[in-house]
Amino acid sequence: MRVIGFIIFFIYIYCEISFFIAIANSVGVLLALIGIIATSIIGFSLIKKQGLKNLSLMQQKIANQQSPKEEIINSVSLLFAGFFLFIPGFLTDILGGILLIPYVQEYIVRFIVKKLPTKVYSFSSSRNVQVNNDVIEGEFERKDDE
Protein backbone atom coordinates (compact mmCIF):
# COMPACT_ATOMS: atom_id res chain seq x y z
CA MET A 1 0.00 0.00 0.00
CA ARG A 2 2.90 2.36 0.71
CA VAL A 3 4.31 1.72 -2.76
CA ILE A 4 1.07 2.91 -4.37
CA GLY A 5 1.17 6.08 -2.25
CA PHE A 6 4.76 6.79 -3.30
CA ILE A 7 3.91 6.18 -6.96
CA ILE A 8 0.95 8.56 -6.79
CA PHE A 9 3.07 11.15 -4.99
CA PHE A 10 5.84 10.99 -7.61
CA ILE A 11 3.33 11.16 -10.47
CA TYR A 12 1.82 14.25 -8.82
CA ILE A 13 5.28 15.85 -8.42
CA TYR A 14 6.14 15.05 -12.04
CA CYS A 15 2.89 16.57 -13.33
CA GLU A 16 3.25 19.65 -11.11
CA ILE A 17 6.84 20.32 -12.20
CA SER A 18 6.00 19.70 -15.87
CA PHE A 19 3.07 22.10 -15.69
CA PHE A 20 5.22 24.73 -13.94
CA ILE A 21 7.96 24.40 -16.58
CA ALA A 22 5.41 24.74 -19.40
CA ILE A 23 3.94 27.91 -17.86
CA ALA A 24 7.39 29.30 -17.00
CA ASN A 25 8.50 28.80 -20.61
CA SER A 26 5.52 30.75 -21.91
CA VAL A 27 5.36 33.66 -19.42
CA GLY A 28 8.73 33.56 -17.66
CA VAL A 29 9.96 32.13 -14.39
CA LEU A 30 9.42 35.30 -12.35
CA LEU A 31 5.83 35.71 -13.50
CA ALA A 32 5.17 32.01 -12.85
CA LEU A 33 6.45 32.36 -9.27
CA ILE A 34 4.43 35.54 -8.76
CA GLY A 35 1.38 33.70 -10.11
CA ILE A 36 1.78 30.87 -7.61
CA ILE A 37 2.18 33.31 -4.71
CA ALA A 38 -0.73 35.48 -5.91
CA THR A 39 -3.09 32.52 -6.24
CA SER A 40 -2.23 31.44 -2.72
CA ILE A 41 -2.90 34.90 -1.28
CA ILE A 42 -6.13 35.39 -3.23
CA GLY A 43 -7.28 31.88 -2.41
CA PHE A 44 -6.73 32.32 1.32
CA SER A 45 -8.60 35.63 1.35
CA LEU A 46 -11.53 34.01 -0.49
CA ILE A 47 -11.53 31.07 1.89
CA LYS A 48 -11.49 33.37 4.89
CA LYS A 49 -14.44 35.37 3.57
CA GLN A 50 -16.48 32.31 2.56
CA GLY A 51 -15.56 30.46 5.74
CA LEU A 52 -16.83 33.28 7.96
CA LYS A 53 -20.01 33.52 5.88
CA ASN A 54 -20.49 29.77 6.17
CA LEU A 55 -19.91 29.91 9.93
CA SER A 56 -22.60 32.57 10.38
CA LEU A 57 -25.06 30.51 8.29
CA MET A 58 -24.27 27.48 10.44
CA GLN A 59 -24.92 29.46 13.63
CA GLN A 60 -28.23 30.74 12.25
CA LYS A 61 -29.38 27.22 11.35
CA ILE A 62 -28.42 25.91 14.78
CA ALA A 63 -30.28 28.81 16.44
CA ASN A 64 -33.37 27.99 14.33
CA GLN A 65 -33.02 24.30 15.27
CA GLN A 66 -32.31 23.24 11.69
CA SER A 67 -29.69 20.78 10.55
CA PRO A 68 -26.41 22.51 9.54
CA LYS A 69 -25.35 19.43 7.54
CA GLU A 70 -24.86 21.29 4.24
CA GLU A 71 -22.84 24.08 5.83
CA ILE A 72 -20.58 21.56 7.53
CA ILE A 73 -19.91 19.86 4.20
CA ASN A 74 -19.26 23.27 2.59
CA SER A 75 -16.80 23.98 5.39
CA VAL A 76 -15.00 20.72 4.67
CA SER A 77 -14.82 21.59 0.97
CA LEU A 78 -13.40 25.01 1.91
CA LEU A 79 -10.85 23.25 4.11
CA PHE A 80 -9.75 21.07 1.19
CA ALA A 81 -9.66 24.10 -1.09
CA GLY A 82 -7.44 25.91 1.38
CA PHE A 83 -5.16 22.89 1.63
CA PHE A 84 -4.82 22.70 -2.16
CA LEU A 85 -4.20 26.45 -2.42
CA PHE A 86 -1.56 26.22 0.31
CA ILE A 87 0.48 23.67 -1.63
CA PRO A 88 2.63 25.52 -4.18
CA GLY A 89 1.89 24.63 -7.76
CA PHE A 90 -0.52 25.43 -10.53
CA LEU A 91 -2.38 22.11 -10.62
CA THR A 92 -3.24 22.24 -6.93
CA ASP A 93 -4.21 25.91 -7.27
CA ILE A 94 -6.57 25.00 -10.10
CA LEU A 95 -8.08 22.18 -8.03
CA GLY A 96 -8.43 24.50 -5.02
CA GLY A 97 -10.06 27.13 -7.22
CA ILE A 98 -12.51 24.56 -8.56
CA LEU A 99 -13.47 23.63 -5.01
CA LEU A 100 -14.24 27.30 -4.30
CA ILE A 101 -16.93 27.45 -7.00
CA PRO A 102 -20.36 27.41 -5.32
CA TYR A 103 -21.89 25.09 -7.95
CA VAL A 104 -19.15 22.52 -7.34
CA GLN A 105 -19.72 22.83 -3.59
CA GLU A 106 -23.46 22.31 -4.10
CA TYR A 107 -22.78 19.21 -6.20
CA ILE A 108 -20.45 17.84 -3.52
CA VAL A 109 -23.05 18.60 -0.84
CA ARG A 110 -25.81 16.85 -2.80
CA PHE A 111 -23.57 13.85 -3.46
CA ILE A 112 -22.48 13.48 0.16
CA VAL A 113 -25.93 14.20 1.64
CA LYS A 114 -27.37 11.34 -0.42
CA LYS A 115 -24.84 9.02 1.24
CA LEU A 116 -25.59 10.21 4.79
CA PRO A 117 -28.41 8.69 6.85
CA THR A 118 -31.61 10.71 6.78
CA LYS A 119 -32.67 10.08 10.37
CA VAL A 120 -31.33 12.69 12.76
CA TYR A 121 -31.23 12.00 16.46
CA SER A 122 -31.62 15.04 18.64
CA PHE A 123 -31.13 15.03 22.37
CA SER A 124 -32.47 18.20 23.89
CA SER A 125 -34.29 19.03 27.05
CA SER A 126 -37.85 20.28 27.03
CA ARG A 127 -38.45 23.92 27.79
CA ASN A 128 -41.40 23.23 30.11
CA VAL A 129 -39.43 21.26 32.67
CA GLN A 130 -39.69 22.59 36.19
CA VAL A 131 -36.48 22.51 38.13
CA ASN A 132 -36.57 21.54 41.78
CA ASN A 133 -33.53 22.88 43.59
CA ASP A 134 -34.18 20.90 46.79
CA VAL A 135 -31.45 18.31 47.13
CA ILE A 136 -31.65 15.59 49.74
CA GLU A 137 -28.45 13.73 50.40
CA GLY A 138 -28.27 10.50 52.31
CA GLU A 139 -27.19 6.90 52.42
CA PHE A 140 -29.33 3.82 52.08
CA GLU A 141 -28.98 0.13 52.47
CA ARG A 142 -31.13 -2.39 50.63
CA LYS A 143 -32.43 -5.34 52.64
CA ASP A 144 -33.96 -8.16 50.68
CA ASP A 145 -37.05 -9.93 52.03
CA GLU A 146 -36.11 -13.47 52.99
Image (spheres, rainbow, N blue to C red):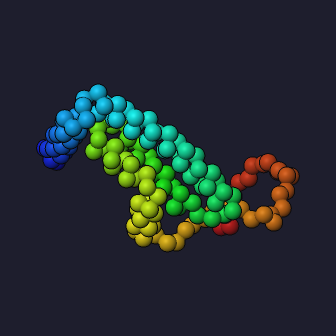
Q: Using the rendered view, name the quadrant where residue 68 is placed.
A: bottom right
- Residue 143 appearing in the image: no
With respect to residue 52, does 102 lie above or below?
below
Toward the top, the furthest residue is 30
The image shows residue 39 at horizontal and vertical percentages of 39, 38
Q: Nearer the viewer, residue 36 or 70?
A: 36
With respect to residue 20, does 29 lie above or below?
above
Does 105 sit left or right of 4 as displayed?
A: right
Q: Using the rendered view, name the quadrant where residue 29 is placed.
A: top left
Which residue occupies 41% across, 60% down?
Answer: 104
Which residue occupies 65% across, 67% down?
Answer: 146
Does 33 sit left or right of 110 as displayed?
A: left
Q: Which of 134 and 108 is in front in this view?
A: 108
Does 129 sit left or right of 81 as displayed?
A: right
Which residue occupies 53% across, 47% down?
Answer: 51
Which residue occupies 71% across, 54% down?
Answer: 141
Does 87 sit left or right of 65 as displayed?
A: left
Toward the front, the furthest residue is 27
The image shows residue 74 at horizontal and vertical percentages of 48, 55
Q: Which of 144 and 24 is in front in this view?
A: 24
With respect to residue 85, does 66 lie above or below?
below
